[in-house]
Amino acid sequence: MATPNKHLHHKDRMNASILESEIFEQPEVLRRLLAQEGEPIARLADSLRGRFDYVIIAARGTSDNAARYAQYLFGAHNRLPVALATPSLFTLYAQPPRMPGALVVGISQSGQSPDIVAVLDEAARQGRPTMAITNDPASPLAQAAAHVIPLHCGPERAVAASKTYTASLAALALFSAALEGSSERADQIRALPEQLHQALQGLAPALARVERYRYMDRCAVIGRGYNYSTAFEVALKIKELTHVVAEPYSSADFRHGPIGMVNEGFPVLLVAPSGAVNEDLRSLVASLRQIGTELLVISDDPHLLEFAHLPMPLPAGLVEWLSPLVSVAPGQLFALQLARARGLDPDHPLGLTKVTETL
C-alpha cells in the first residue's frame, strides 16, 4: 500500500488523525513482522519446546487483551494452559507465587511498566524461561527477559494502541504455530495482511452511519472463543476514545445475568466471525431481536449481518483462530469515528497518556 489510508478521498486524508493512519498501517506492520520475525520465532520455539508445561502472561490494558487471545490460542493448538499473572502479588504484596514448569511471558507495547517487569524478574529468579513481546527491544521489559520478540511497529504516536495490539496477536500466533511445527498454520498467518487490508477497505459504508450513535452513553460488546479478546479490546477502544461505558462479555456470561440490563434500543456490538461459536451467537441475536436491541455486528456471516442495524462486514475466508487480528479493525474504526461524531480528539483522549507505569 502506497499510503496506509489510500482509499480515502484527498480531503479526508488531509484531515486524517494519527490514530486513523496507524489503524490503516496495520496490514503493512503485519507484513514487516512476518518477514523479520518468522525465522527468529521458529528458532525460539525450537529452543523452548519441552522446557515448560504451561504459560503465565503478565500484561496490562490492551496487552492484557492479547493475553486473553493467547489463552484460547495456546490452549486449543498447543494444549497448554495459560494463566494471567497477578502483578500486584509481585509488587504491592511482595508474595509472588511459585511458578514451577511455567514459561513466563510479558506483553507490553512500551515495555516500561514496573509491575510487568517485576513478574519476569521473579520468574528469572525462580529459574523459569522468560519471553518479552514488546515494541521497544531496549525497554526494561526486554532487558528483563531471556528472549525478546520485537513487534517492528515503528513509533505508535496515538495514545490508543492499534497496530501494537494486532502485532502482539501476530507474534503470539507465530510462536504458537512454530511451537506446534505446523506449516499449514504458518501459511494461514501469511494470508493475514491482505485479509486485514480487505477488511479495512470494506468499512466505508458502515462508518458513514456512525453518527447514528452519537448520543449513546452505554453499550455491551460481545464475543466468544477466540474473539472474547476482541470484545474486550473493542470495548476498551470505545471507552478510551468516546467516554461511552462499554462493557465486554462472552455470549455465555452475558446470558448469566447481564442480559437483564438490555431493553429496547440498547446498543449491543457483536463480534461474530464464522467458527465454532457461530450458532451460539445466532441464538443470542434471535433473543436480542425479540427485546428490540440495537444491533451492531462485525461478521462475515450474511445471516448475522442481515439483522444488524450497523453491519460491519469481514472478508470471506478467515480461519477462526486468526480472526481476532482482522475482526478488531472494524471496532477500532467504529470507536474512532464515534469519537469524531461526539466532537472528541481521538489522538489525545482526555485523562490518558501513551505510557502508563503501574506498580
Image (tube, rainbow, N blue to C red):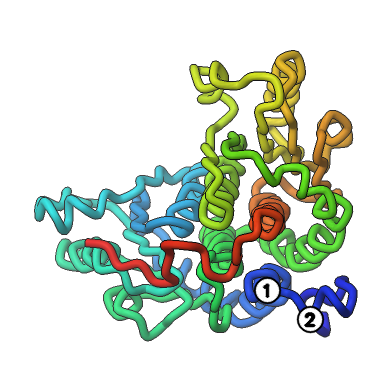
Residue 28 quadrant:
bottom right
Question: Relative to the observer, which residue lies in front, 288 or 44?
Answer: 288
Report whether residue 178 is seen: no
Which residue in the protein does label 1 denote?
Answer: 17
Residue 142: % across, % down = 35, 77
Q: Is residue 49 left or right of residue 12?
A: left
Q: Element at badge 1?
A: loop
Which residue in the protein does label 2 denote?
Answer: 14
Quadrant placement of the C terminus: bottom left
Type of the residue with mark 2:
Met
Point out which mark residue 154 bears. Answer: none
Crowd around label 1: few <14 · some 14–19 · many ≥20 (10 Å): some
Question: Relative to the observer, which residue lies in front, 124 or 136?
Answer: 136
Q: Residue at x 55, y 69 (%)?
A: 164
Q: Is residue 24 above or below residue 282?
A: below
Q: Is residue 219 left or right of residue 55?
A: right
Q: Is residue 255 above or below residue 315?
A: above
Residue 230: % across, % down = 59, 47
Q: Residue furthest left?
A: 94
Real-space Cα separation, disc 1 to disc 2, in angstroms: 9 Å
Question: Relative to the observer, which residue lies in front, 209 or 114?
Answer: 209
Residue 271 quadrant:
top right
Q: Residue at x 64, y 39 (%)?
A: 216
Type of the residue with mark 1:
Ser
Q: Is residue 29 above or below residue 337?
A: below
Q: Is residue 353 left or right of residue 220?
A: left
Q: Residue at x 69, y 46 (%)?
A: 214
